[in-house]
Image: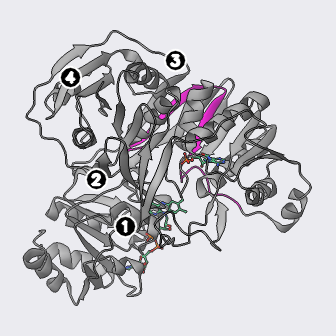
């Protein structure tokens, strides 16, 4: 018995949200095992073994798991999951893709994106784009849960768990990886950044995001966007912050040319300090901003860059 | 190829919800309801596949109260051919919905199932993946592009780091993301025509599915409110406040 945490990683390293998921597991209580399913994923497994509170890391190293295809990984996790009371994964795109499949294979419900652990069977999670928080209790024998990283601190990397190789290979043979177009950036990753500056439709076009990039460089910030900016093709999809994009909670979030629709707020309103720059003083974003500047972004951004 | 589309009746995305005073749920009395936006994208994708000659028939299915017929009629007006309502007054969780859909899949034998990636009320993001597990079908979740090619479908997915393309054996499940397409509006003549299209009503019991959930909601609360901030008069003042008051830069 105990808790199984399904790691998210890119084989070479662990994705940050895995460490937050381990903290959620610690709050539930019980022995923590981390599964790293991948291909040539020894480095990711070594990182997992360092996470504080983890007693064992299981490594399933096989070509079938290289791209974390849900059809294959879910079979493995369901096979292992029978021996645990809880199966957790970070609510990343991989976690969201794999875990519901695991839950259905185990014939249990999934509890999505918990933000707090009340007890081993009771959790809090946002619903309706974060406009309500539900406390829910599960009577399922195995609790299958995805964890919202912003709800939990990252576990420290000062542990030393044992690492055990798994022989089981599960290949459903129904899906194949074809290719990926991954964003390359020297800036911090959105969900890990301490400071984020995001642009919306008000930016006008993709080139104007350079104005945000310059401020971001001064602040060591990540750059995000609203749905409208992504839909208009200004920036790629992985920059979208919101209910159906990335959920962030940095120390400082600067929203520029973003009106503040509830779907956008859902992704950033737990930030410690919020700044809004918008030329419309009635924009709803000002209702959640600690500091609001009513100004034209095309003059405010260069000035801000100059003064930092 | 037959395409099955699952649509859910939810609160309209523009409505600001309120939590009930007794903290049992959100208050949905007299609130505007609509088709889940991701399901609109799913219907649109199916209609485009039919327009391209890839899909031959579009069946839409919803699990929910009697009123969910409205959303099914909307889907019919947008181009679906027939509809199935699995009527129940109970709240069915994603596993229950997936079990019902698995029965419908067994009856209808679609080549492709298109669903939304997420309901905007429960924010679950589960049902398509669960249906995949129950039927053994592969899944292309969070799709921004779908191309059917013979016995396979190629799906481009919006993932954390960018985009990923997978090839899936048919029959398969696709769940839609925002960039897949821009849904059309139903025209008045098509709304009129939709009234005559077939809409079958069944119950979970007819399908032999037990939808009892092991998860119960103990409490629903409003989130912690942010205290109102201030307006600054200039960029200088903003920088000063961020440095000396908030101490975040
Ligand atoms: C199912 C669903 C899911 C969604 N998910 C998300 C999500 O995850 N994330 C998200 O962001 N949205 C999401 N949305 C969309 C959301 O409802 C809004 O449409 C979107 O957030 C608006 O983006 P915006 O604020 O950039 O654009 P707008 O609402 O058009 O606002 C632009 C703002 O820029 C200001 N502006 C214009 N020019 C200037 C200037 N020169 N200087 C200063 N200010 C200027 C304007 O005053 C305005 O306030 C979703 C919607 C649906 C239906
Ligand atoms: N009650 C329902 N009836 C029909 N389809 C549903 C229902 N619930 C969920 N779905 C489908 O599953 C998708 C994802 O929902 P969820 O997993 O609840 O976030 C929705 O966009 C629908 O396509």
Task: Provide the residue designation for mark 1.
Answer: B223
In this view, B150 is above or below B86: above
Tag 3 and tag 4 share a subunit: yes
Q: Earlier in the sequence, mark 3 or mark 4?
A: 4
Answer whether residue A133 is magenta in the image: no
Task: Provide the residue designation for mark 3.
Answer: A172
In this view, A121 is above or below A307: above
* Label 4 CB-ligand 2 distance < 8 A: no
Cα–Cα gap, marks 1 and 4: 36 Å
Tell me residue B116's x, y (percent): 59, 48
Tell me residue B76's x, y (percent): 80, 53
In this view, B65 is above or below A63: below
The reply to whether discs 2 and 4 touch (Cβ–Cβ < 8 Å) is no
- In the picture, the quarter occupied by the C terminus of chain A is bottom left
Cα–Cα gap, marks 1 and 3: 42 Å
* Mark 3: secondary structure: loop
* Residue A151, numbered label: 2
Cα–Cα gap, marks 2 and 4: 24 Å
A22 left or right of A156 in image: right
- Of badges 3 and 4, nearer the viewer stands 4
B111 left or right of A166 in image: right
Q: Earlier in the sequence, mark 2 or mark 3?
A: 2
- Looking at the picture, the colour scheme in use is one colour
Q: Residue at x 47, y 73 (%)?
A: B21
Cα–Cα gap, marks 2 and 3: 34 Å
Disc 1 packing (10 Å; few <14; some 14–19; many ≥20)? few
* Mark 1: secondary structure: loop
Q: Residue at x 73, y 28 (%)?
A: B106
Task: Provide the residue designation for mark 4.
Answer: A56
């Amino acid at each position: 018995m105990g808790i199984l945490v399904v790691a998210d990683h890119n084989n070479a390293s662990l994705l940050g949200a895995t460490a937050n998921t381990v903290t959620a597991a610690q709050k539930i209580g019980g022995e923590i095992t981390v599964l790293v399913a991948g291909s040539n994923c020894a480095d990711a497994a070594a990182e997992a073994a360092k996470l504080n509170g983890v007693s064992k890391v299981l490594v399933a190293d096989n070509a079938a798991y290289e791209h974390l295809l849900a059809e294959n990984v879910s079979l493995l996790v369901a096979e292992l999951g029978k021996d645990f009371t809880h199966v957790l994964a970070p609510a990343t795109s991989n976690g969201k893709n794999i875990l519901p499949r695991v839950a259905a294979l185990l014939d249990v419900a999934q509890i999505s994106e918990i933000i707090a652990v009340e007890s081993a069977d009771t959790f809090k999670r946002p619903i309706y784009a974060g406009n309500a928080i539900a406390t829910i209790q599960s009577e399922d024998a195995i609790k299958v849960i995805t964890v919202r990283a912003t709800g939990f601190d990252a576990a420290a990397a000062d542990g030393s768990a044992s690492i055990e190789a798994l022989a089981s290979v599960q290949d459903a043979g129904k899906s194949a990886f074809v290719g990926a177009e991954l964003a390359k950036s020297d800036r911090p990753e959105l969900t890990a950044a301490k400071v984020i500056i995001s642009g919306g439709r008000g930016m006008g076009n993709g080139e104007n995001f350079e104005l945000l990039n310059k401020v971001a460089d001064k602040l060591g910030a990540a750059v995000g966007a609203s749905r409208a900016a992504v839909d208009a093709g200004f920036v790629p999809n992985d920059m979208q912050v919101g209910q159906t994009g990335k959920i962030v909670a940095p120390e400082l979030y600067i929203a520029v040319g973003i009106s503040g629709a509830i779907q956008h707020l859902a992704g950033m309103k737990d930030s410690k300090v919020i700044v809004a720059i918008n030329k419309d003083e009635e924009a709803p974003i000002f209702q959640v901003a600690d500091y609001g500047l009513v100004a034209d972004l095309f003059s405010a951004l260069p000035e801000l860059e100059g003064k930092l | 190829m037959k395409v099955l589309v699952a649509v859910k009746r939810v609160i309209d995305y523009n409505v600001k919800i309120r939590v009930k005073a007794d903290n049992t749920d959100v208050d949905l009395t007299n609130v505007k309801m609509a088709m889940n936006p991701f399901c609109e994208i799913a219907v649109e994708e199916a209609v485009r596949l039919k327009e391209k000659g890839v899909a031959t028939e579009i069946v839409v299915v919803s699990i929910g109260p009697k009123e969910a017929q409205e959303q099914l009629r909307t889907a019919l007006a947008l181009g679906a051919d027939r509809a199935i309502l699995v009527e129940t007054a109970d709240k069915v969780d994603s596993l229950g919905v997936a079990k019902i859909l698995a029965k419908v899949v067994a009856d209808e034998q679609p080549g492709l199932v298109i669903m939304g990636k997420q309901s905007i009320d429960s924010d679950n993001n589960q049902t398509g993946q669960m249906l995949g597990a129950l039927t053994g079908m592969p899944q292309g979740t969070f799709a921004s592009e779908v191309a059917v090619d013979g016995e396979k479908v190629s799906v481009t997915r919006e993932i954390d780091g960018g985009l990923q393309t997978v090839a899936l054996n048919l029959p398969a499940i696709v769940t839609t993301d925002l960039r897949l397409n821009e849904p059309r509006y139903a025209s008045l003549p098509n709304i009129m025509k939709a009234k005559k299209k077939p809409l079958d009503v069944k119950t979970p019991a007819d399908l032999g599915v037990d939808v009892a959930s092991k998860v119960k909601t103990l409490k629903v609360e409003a989130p912690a409110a942010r205290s109102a901030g201030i307006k600054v008069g200039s960029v200088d003042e903003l920088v000063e406040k961020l440095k000396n008051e908030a101490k975040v830069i």
